[in-house]
Image (tube, helix red, strand yellow):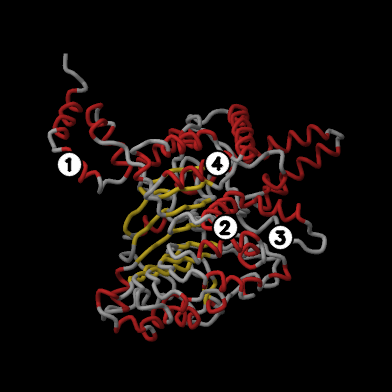
Amino acid sequence: MEDPNAEARADESVLLRIPSELLAAICVFLPNKDIKALRLAGPSICHAVPPRFSRVFLSPNPRNVAVFRAIASHPTFRLSVREIVYDDARLADPDVDRDRLNDATRADAQEELSDVDAWMGAGLQLAAKEGAKRAWFGSRRERNLRELHGRNANDTGNLEKKKERAEQRAAHPPLETCYQHYLGLVREQTKMMEAGEDIKALIEGIEAFPALERITITPATHGYLYTPLYCTPMIRSLPYGFNGPIPRGWPTSKDTPLQRLLPWVTGPDWNENDVKRQKERWRGLVLVIKTLAERIRNGQSVVAGLVMDVHSLNTGVSPYMLTQECEEYDNLKLILQHPGFHRLELPILITGVQHNDVAILENGRLKSLLASAQHLQHFRLRGDGQIDPDSPSPRRFFPLQTLVPVEAWPQLRHFGLSKFVVRIADLVAALARLPPTLRSVELSFLDFHGSESRENHEGLLEQMKLRLPWVTWPADARPQVTMGMAKVTNNVDGRGLWFSKEIGEYLYGDKRNPFDWHRDVLLPGVGWLRDEYDEDFARPYLGYKDYRALWYSEES
């Protein structure tokens, strides 16, 4: 009888004939997913190719903390860790109204309130409370399934991933099973936060990882249903096909903000407990910054980079943290001014501030904070890209000179700006002040201010070619400019069209403006498509079928 495993063993034996030094050198260039696949080829190759832990995950979840500590205490695995990803997407507590409203649409909120009012009107207070929790859980499951369809219905590629998601959907457990499992996870999370186990583990990890370069704090870890941004140990341990509310942690909105942002300092009718509750919405960020600042005060080393990464979510750091005299402002400033600090990625939540605070980012404190990072080499600033219809300034334009102290960064090599409202003259003036050390620029998902005909992507590139001195720099020192943009109005969240080569050919050569006379439209043949939550989605932009893959489908 033919051995079904003979072919796999033959492949394994070929790999094992490669000298171990050469095999190790090859594996350096492989991504982690290929390392994992290689180790699955057989027990011998699994032993010959050790796992690589360049990134570790942490959150107030027992599974994440246990794996994090296991790597931190391992004599070999801990040596290769370069990044800690702190998952600040805490599970929403069904008992907390604020949690249930987070990442909700106005329609979601109105539906929940109408159900509660009906129960309360019938005198069923207890039923109203329990019913609101279950209704919220069920409606989020239904929304997840609608989004799963909407994100993938127009994508004719990426068939393997679509098949995997379809299998998970077919296997998803019933509501009650998922609900009870979710409540257990929330209880575990509460215990971990009360004991501070995640922060204790963070302190241990910073000491244990000698190659650590940066800490990333993100509320986007869970991505979308069956498409997480990171497959953390907690996410891997979920029941197959699990469908429950996607946690976000930081204040997030689907359409317009349902909860206003509030100050980080006390004031009239706003006491210390109110401030504490507001800061708790960014719990992980606050504690990571505090931990790093305390290390500096104690004369200990800190990481070279701090990345606050929201990906495509409508959220960010509270502007009050960046502009008011609070402990977190002082802690962050201490980190930025440390000589070994080189990288900062900062998303700011602008939508939802108090109406009398719409200009708070221009009070000079944010610019002063950023100016303290005199050794900065990599900087990315992101807005939230939202419209706040309740604000007196629904599309707020901030002159970059009031926010970004580019003259204070003589070593800057990368500059990124994303999801901000811009004016071409202001943006080009800021780019012109960047130092000659600059090597790359990202301009993505920008919203052009005003109705002038030249305020668009075509006009931006034209003015960059006319007014920037980069073309006079040595050819190998000219910055590579990358742009990202949504291709359609109803764009799938996290997907976009990116291009770079054509920009360089226009700015530094004799090729035509890639937009030509189309202003904000790129024709097929320019750029590539990318999904921030699914690396296998990437493809060149060649035709209409690629265009449709960016389009969210409302049809069920």
**Residue situated in front as seen by the camera: 308 or 417:** 308
Cα–Cα span, label 3 and label 1: 57 Å
Looking at the image, residue 25 lies above or below residue 434: above
Cα–Cα span, label 1 and label 4: 37 Å
Residue highlighted by disc 1: 21
Q: Residues within 10 Å of mark 3 (few under 14, many from 20)?
A: some
Q: Regarding mark 4 in the picture, which secondary structure is present there?
A: helix
Single out the residue that lies furthest toward the top: 1
Q: Dividing the image into 4 quarters, which one contains the N terminus?
A: top left
Q: Regarding mark 3 in the picture, which secondary structure is present there?
A: loop
Q: Position of residue 472 (x, y in %)?
A: 29, 84
Instruction: Tell me where residue 342 sits by quadrant.
Output: bottom left
Q: Regarding mark 2 in the picture, which secondary structure is present there?
A: loop
Sequence-first disc among 4 and 2: 4
Sequence-first disc among 4 and 3: 4
Please tell me whether mark 1 or mark 2 is closer to you in this view. Answer: 1
Residue highlighted by disc 3: 262
Residue highlighted by disc 4: 198
Looking at the image, residue 280 lies above or below residue 503: above
Residue 186 in the figure: left or right of residue 164: right
